[in-house]
Image: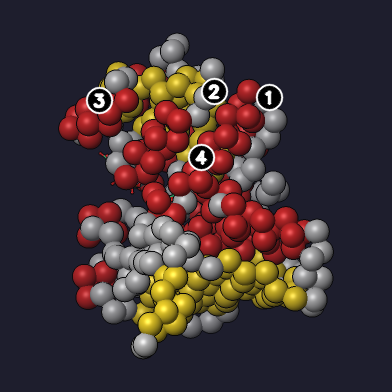
Amino acid sequence: MIRIAIIGAGRIGHVHARAVANHPQAELVLVCDPFEKNAKELSAQYGVKYCLDPQEVFSSPDVDAVIIGSPTRFHVDHILAAVKAGKKVMSEKPIALDLASAKRCVDELGDAADHVMMGFNRRFDPSFAEIHHRVADGEVGDLQQLIVVSRDPAAPPAEYVAGSGGIFKDMTIHDFDTVRFFLGDIAEVTAVGTNVDEAIKAQGDFDQVLVTLKSVDGKLATIVNSRSCAFGYDQRLEAFGADGMLSADNLTETAVRKASGNQTEAKSAVMDFFLDRYEDAYRIELGHFIEAAASGEAVSPSVRDGYAALQLAEAAGLSAKEGRTVAIEANKVPAAV
Ligand SMILES: NC(=O)c1ccc[n+]([C@@H]2O[C@H](COP(=O)([O-])OP(=O)(O)OC[C@H]3O[C@@H](n4cnc5c(N)ncnc54)[C@H](O)[C@@H]3O)[C@@H](O)[C@H]2O)c1
């Protein structure tokens, strides 16, 4: 049994708490959030203790592992302190708001970086994971192009956007990791962005972006992101190869379809947001973390992948700002797993 504490009792803290509570080898023992109302509410749901100061988590002898779901600006400090205290760690994405902090994190961790898991949950989504292993098995021949569509149902609150690091670091970061998962290291990034959301525009951020990437091996990927989508959480993937294509469509709550005089093939609405759409992925992700914690094996994705994805996010930001393709300096990428 691995005793787990969760730091940050917000949206993602609730998702992880549910996964921990349902895992047979895990026990949720502590919830930490400086905002007492949030800490109290989540801890009460599972009948566990709460604290307001993360130091109490790090110094507690009753905690074996820590899941970090605090706002992004705290991730590096929380990761380093937890590892120093001898805890197993999984941190939410992105690793940091800037590449220098991410580099400090990976450098200070040293070999321990291979054991700190990054919450790129989409690698564990059953549909995307199946496409990944079937591509690796050569089912569509040489992979040539990858298309990742990721649209949120609605923009997050203004205060979340303000602390998020912007769309490339907060949202596209998942898709940068997906592209690396399929194509390996990336050589070039080209991005454009625009706004349909005036509140996000006022914060100097984009709410719609398109990114194209070229891998070191010359393979291409396109990422399509929007902070809003009228029909729900639009999450699709297409892997196009020399011998065919593997693709995953949106999931709906049921498989029921409707045909009528003015419609054919209409299904029920797509799952609305990450907690439902990726519930299986968070569960499988946690299972991987727990197995690695028990065996001492390296984790994948690790904070090294967190660094590499953030490098692509910074390149995309620069590309969109300056209207040019940005080359990725391969020698700056720490060995990714
Ligand atoms: N993997 C995913 O699918 C996914 C989804 C959502 C969010 N996230 C990531 O999770 C992190 C949190 O996002 P969220 O949507 O849950 O935000 P949120 O605002 O809903 O929750 C953040 C929580 O952290 C608490 N907090 C503030 N300062 C803290 C501190 N110093 N120490 C500990 N807790 C603190 C807040 O009180 C709040 O309860 C972000 O980094 C975000 O990028 C990942």
For the point 27% across and 54% down, which residue is it?
160
Report if the CB atoms under discs 2 and 4 are less than 8 Å apart: no
Above or below, 59 against 218 in this view is above
Residue 44's disc number: 3
Percent position of residue 20, x then y: 45, 30
Three-letter amino acid code of the residue under disc 3:
Ala
| Mark 3 or 1: the one toward you | 3
User: N-terminal of the two: label 2 or label 1?
Assistant: 2
Q: Secondary structure at mark 3?
A: helix
Marks 3 and 1, the one that precedes in the sequence: 3
Q: How far apart are the alpha carbons under marks 2 and 4? A: 12 Å
Q: Quick one: label 1, few (<14), some, or many (20+) residues within 10 Å?
A: few
Pointer 2 or 3: first along the chain: 2
- Under mark 1, the amino acid is Ser
Mark 1: which secondary structure? Answer: helix
Q: Nearer the viewer, mark 2 or mark 1?
A: 2
Q: Which amino acid type is shown beneath numbered disc 2? A: Gln
Q: What is the spatial separation of the Cα atoms under label 1 and label 4, in whole angstroms?
A: 18 Å
Residue 197 position by quadrant = bottom left
- Residue displayed at 80% across by 76% down: 243
Q: Residue at horizontal 37%, vertical 87%? A: 261
Answer few, some or many: residues within 10 Å of disc 2's Cα (few below 14, many 20 plus, some between 14 and 19).
some
Q: Which residue is mark 2?
A: 25
Q: Residues within 10 Å of mark 4 (few under 14, many from 20)?
A: many
Q: Could you say which disc has been placed on residue 295 in the image?
A: 1
Element marked by disc 4: helix
For mark 2, give the secondary structure.
loop
| Residue 52 appears in the picture as rendered | no
Q: Which residue is mark 4?
A: 283
The image shows residue 263 at horizontal and vertical percentages of: 39, 84
